Image: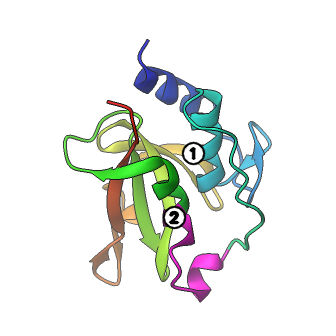
Amino acid sequence: MTWRDNVVAEAKTWMLTPHVNAARIKGAGVDCGTLLLEVFEHCGLIPHTDVGWYPADFHLHQSEEKYLSFVNMFCDQTEPPFLPGDVAVFKFGRCVSHAGIVVEWPTIIHAYIGVGVIMSSVNESLLLYNNGESRMAGVYRLRGQE
């Protein structure tokens, strides 16, 4: 199995975990950011990373790209074709504040508020547009992984 296969397989084990802000426990609670950290850490691709506490609505009150700064710690923006294990990021509110792991483009696994960990297409309405602007803010690939 490749690292990409391992990432997708691990992400699938988180399916139906409830969305709980800042939680990191499979089956009990996770948010979209901690899902990424737990999956990549479990696969041995990144070290344990503590992002500290943050309010669930941080993205509505500031324009600081805090979420994106954590993605940039381990990933670089990439161009198509987007591959399994890549990270699709989205802008909700004033800054990047949501992401999912690519299963097979355009399908991602992500933890969505009020829903939990699901698999869906980036083309679904909840991820597509905000006031006519695309929510999609790019796709990132783990640094050092081909």
| 5 or 15, nearer to the observer | 5
- Residue 15 visible (yes or no): no
Query: Residue 36: which numbered mark, if any?
Result: 1
At 73% from the left edge and 70% from the top edge, which residue is drawn? 54
Could you tell me which quadrant the N terminus lies in? top left
Secondary element under disc 1, as helix, strand or loop, is helix
- Residue 129 visible (yes or no): yes
| Amino acid type, callout 2 | Ser
Magenta residues span 57-69
x%, y% of residue 83? 30, 35
Residue where numbered disc 2 is placed? 69
As drawn, which residue projects farthest toward the top? 1
- Whichever of labels 1 and 2 marks the residue nearer the N terminus, that label is 1
* Mark 2 closeness class: few <14, some 14–19, many ≥20 residues within 10 Å: few
> Dividing the picture into quarters, in which one does residue 86 lie?
top left
At 62% from the left edge and 44% from the top edge, which residue is drawn? 37
At 34% from the left edge and 84% from the top edge, which residue is drawn? 131
Position of residue 139 relative to residue 37, above or below, is below
Could you tell me which quadrant the C terminus lies in? top left
> Dividing the picture into quarters, in which one does residue 135 lie?
bottom left
The reply to whether the magenta stretch includes residue 63 is: yes
At 29% from the left edge and 40% from the top edge, which residue is drawn? 105
As drawn, which residue projects farthest toward the bottom? 61
Q: CA distance from mark 1 to mark 2?
A: 14 Å
| Amino acid type, callout 1 | Leu
| 76 or 101, nearer to the observer | 76
* Mark 1 closeness class: few <14, some 14–19, many ≥20 residues within 10 Å: many
Position of residue 53 relative to residue 94, above or below, is above
| 107 or 79, nearer to the observer | 79
Q: Main SS type for the magenta part? A: helix
